[in-house]
Amino acid sequence: NGAAFSKLRGSQSGQDSTRWHVVRKFLGLISSHNIPVYLIDPLILGLVDKDIEQIRSSPDGPSPECKYFCAPRDFTTFALLDKTWKHEVGFLRTAEKMGFQWLKIINKDPRLDGLDDLSGMEIPLHYIFKLASHAIHLVVFYERSGNFLWHGPLRLKQHMDRKFVPFRKLHFGRYPGAYEKPELLLVSIDDLKVQIPKNPSSFLEEMSHSRFLECRYREARAFFQLYPDDASLDAVEFRKKAKSLLHLAALTLNNLGVKFWLSSGTCLGWYRQCNVIPHSKDVDLGIFIRDYKADIIPAFQKAGLPLKHKFGKVEDSLELSFQGEDDVKLDIFFFYEEDDHVWNGGTQAKSGKKFKYLFPKFTLCWTEFVELRVHVPCETLQYVEANYGPEWKVPVKTWDWKSSPSNVQDNGVWPIDEWDNVIQIY
Amino acid sequence: MDEWKPSPAGKPHKKRSWYLAWKYKLMNQRALRKLCQTGAVLFLLVTVIVNIKLILDTRRAAYEEEEESAQDYDDEMLNVEVPRHPVNNKKVLDVEVYSSRSKVYVAVDGTTVLEDEAREQGRGIHVIVLNQATGHVMAKRVFDTYSPHEDEAMVLFLNMVARGRILIFTIKDEGSFHLKETAKNVLKSLGSQVAPFLSWRDMWTFVGKKGGEVYGEKHAKSPALSTWGDPVLLKTEVHLTSVEDAECHWPDTELNRRRKRFCSKVEGYGSVCSCKDPTPIEFNPDPLKDNKVFDVPVAVIAGNRPNYLYRMLRSLLSAQGVNPQMITVFIDGYYEEPMDVVELFGLSGIQHTPISIKNARVSQHYKASLTATFNLFPDAKFAVVLEEDLDISVDFFSFLSQSIHLLEEDESLYCISAWNDQGYEHTAEDPSLLYRVETMPGLGWVLRKSLYKDELEPKWPTPEKLWDWDMWMRMPEQRKGRECIIPDISRSYHFGIVGLNMNGYFHEAYFKKHKFNTVPNVQLKNVESLRKDNYETEIHRLLGEAEVLDHSKNPCEDSFVPDTEGRVYVMFIRMEQEADFTTWTQLAKCLHIWDLDVRGNHKGLWRLFRKKNHFLVVGVPASPYSSKKPSSVTPIYMEPPAKEEGAVAVPAAEQT
């Protein structure tokens, strides 16, 4: 009756039912091979989100009209979790028999990238199934260390048909992306049974900030060729503590819903060597002041990290420092956004002197670091260079936060009557 | 007179094993004891003479070699001058085969497919198998038929090669010393006229089709015991057949497509490539009920021993509860054939470019493999670590499924291992019994992710350290007093004999008689008693019930343990402090169990079986269980032997 229904709808509204047919065929194909896909098409999810209450309440009800799958579009996008299926050739054969033309984009496995000299089989990142004038874009998601899902970029290799579909219009694949593992919901829309993210609006929100940066493993290897890694027991111990402190900090801030990124030495460690710099002695995070919450201090204290000092105030140069295990310190710098730059402040406790560290504007990307999904500035090079100058590639053991950074500026002195508030040391 | 040195390092092992085997058989027959001794002395004498001869020969050989290599050089120049390009549709292959003391090579249509002129290796018969339709090399093997049993391996291999394939043979150095009748007959059946008469240091080359014509054979006899036959070079032509004739016509299925790809590339895997009745490559063993290890990744660590890998994966994929999607094979090096095997079984494989030498390389390969495993399966809390030279018991996953929660919950545990170092045919009895041991047996084990990520990975020995990873893991700095759970009867079997730390003698003495569980679905007994505190209660219960053996008797004698079954006995040995294993080592030696270092102990207690009775050994006074010793009993002390006997500790490959 689906065909009859669509014919009806198609004729009445002048909409194209080709898409609906192709999607139905595709869903038939994947269910015949037991492949659990879910819908991640942002345009459809946007429409679905508006009616989500109704859709949830009547999971089986027939649709009076074709609302979602009949808008004429070049693509409909689905996601597939790699670990839930076997890479079966049979699946593609059936697709061919059903009349689909398909394209598979494979590339090397990023989960092996950080490892010296390992070469695995290339993994499928994207599939495109084309039938008549419509195409299904199937994005393959992989589980990564740090409890998140990753999808790869879509890059065409030389011999590939560049006109197979209008690739530029695809919603996924311009960059690699990182997502939380979604909760799924089985719904019936336009008489098609399909899985969707349980909360489409938060999925769409996530999608807009999903860009993922891989660590620069090759450069990191080159770095270690020049400067062999410190394998001393102290270094091993420090890294272990820094890692667990970062995990604890991430957990605490994520629970509060406060967005943060790796800053200063921790960011440099990620960018330069894909690891914690063993002689850095602390963990540095950045937070935009607009994301500041008063709960931050009590939340860390509750997590077993007492406040060590608090410099500045929310309106100006705020900086918090928490005491981790055995002298490993967690520094949180709050960043203030101006028209053409961002900055964070520093305070010298004994003199009340203020400093200002200037950075070019940046956006945030996801990355994987010490088995954690964290943010880093997407424009990492500019960020690191602003902080450490053009010589950032050379390790420096002595670092003075008041004079060494190349982006430091004097910023006056706190008025003495404010000292009790803006210089708090515990 | 420094020619009169004792025999080179490797030599005594063979002698000892032979002597031991003999001694063992004749032990109880007093009359034969004398004969035995005389025989041993005689054998010793012969060995000494042979060795002296060898030393002399080696010196002469070094001199002869220079002339020989000059000759080789000329041959190569010839090849360069007349380059031959293989043409695709050509129906004839030019084959050149060279055999000499220090170098062998095989060239097919001008392309060198085998060249071995390395010193001190590659001795014996080199065999190459070519595809009769394409001329591609399908297998390359060398059988050191100077050493025992290698001829059997060769026969096995030749029997597995499909009819119609082209076989090329060439000898490097020596290939006849242990080439027995059976092997000679197989070569004869392939059409060789020389094989039955091959003798000491003859040079030989042969090209023929299995079950078909002979393309050529050349032979140079060694004129005297101390010299080699002249190098021989065989040049011949081989006529190719059509691809159709060289392939089987299996039904077109996904599995058979994999099989076809595999069988057109490699040889020597027997019935998997049989046209008529190919052996399955998918096994579908019974699933396990409530399988706790279904989602645990399995890392198979492999080198370039594709036949081993093939045998290993077969047994792994046949084990009940196996989940092929969780298996990753890590191959140390860019070797094609192991990868072919992995693909045959539809598994995923990862290759690892070697970055350092020998043990350190293995160790770096392990690290990369373990890190990759936890990257690929970020949700996993554990990883099963296997090696390519293990057979896996049918209830391997069942064993792990029943015990894995201990590793999760008991922080005093270091690992679960499928291997009992002391579990020999005569010392292991109960498939449902588990132990706690202070050593880390490896050979099929489960690693906790947190242990790896938090402790081992960050300080894993760097390549320049040249450490064995397993030795390193056994060091107190790493193990930190934690223990491993092992079964009484091993769930893995170590079949590898050609490995870095392995040779034939060593394998025979320490691994061959190992017990291996073949019973499916064994229900493990009292698993909860393996937890730290429960285990102490259990041991005290056992010791309370154990009968003290008669300490005036010789513990090495069979009669030390009464002729009963199912009883629990205890003996006390002297053990002055925690690290005093003098008596234990002697006892282990005479019980014919692992004695090269101390394994299988728990607080100065060893548990094994003798004559189907549970047999406990307590080290007094070091063990906390010493209090169970009746005051009337004096702990047994066994003297370490004179130096000569102890010389076996480091096995080394035999060399000519």
Image: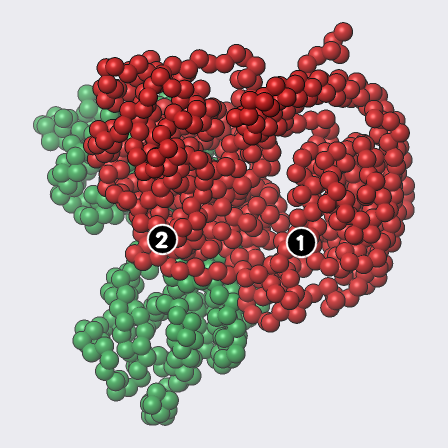
Task: Give me the chain letter of mark 2.
Answer: B
Q: Is residue B147 left or right of residue A196?
A: right
Task: Give me the chain letter of mark 1.
Answer: B
Q: Which residue is mark 1?
A: B160
- The type of residue carrying mark 2 is Asn
Q: What residue do we see at 55% from left, 49% from top?
A: B311
Q: Quarter of the image for the N terminus of chain A: give it.
A: bottom left
- Residue B521's mark? 2
- Quadrant in which residue B71 is drawn: top right
Q: Same chain, marks 1 and 2?
A: yes
- The type of residue carrying mark 1 is Met
- How was this image coloured? by chain
Q: Residues within 10 Å of mark 1 (few under 14, many from 20)?
A: some
Circles 1 and 2: CB atoms closer than 8 Å: no
Report whether residue B122 is seen.
no
Residue B525 image point, x, y percent: 28, 44
Q: Colour of chain A?
A: green
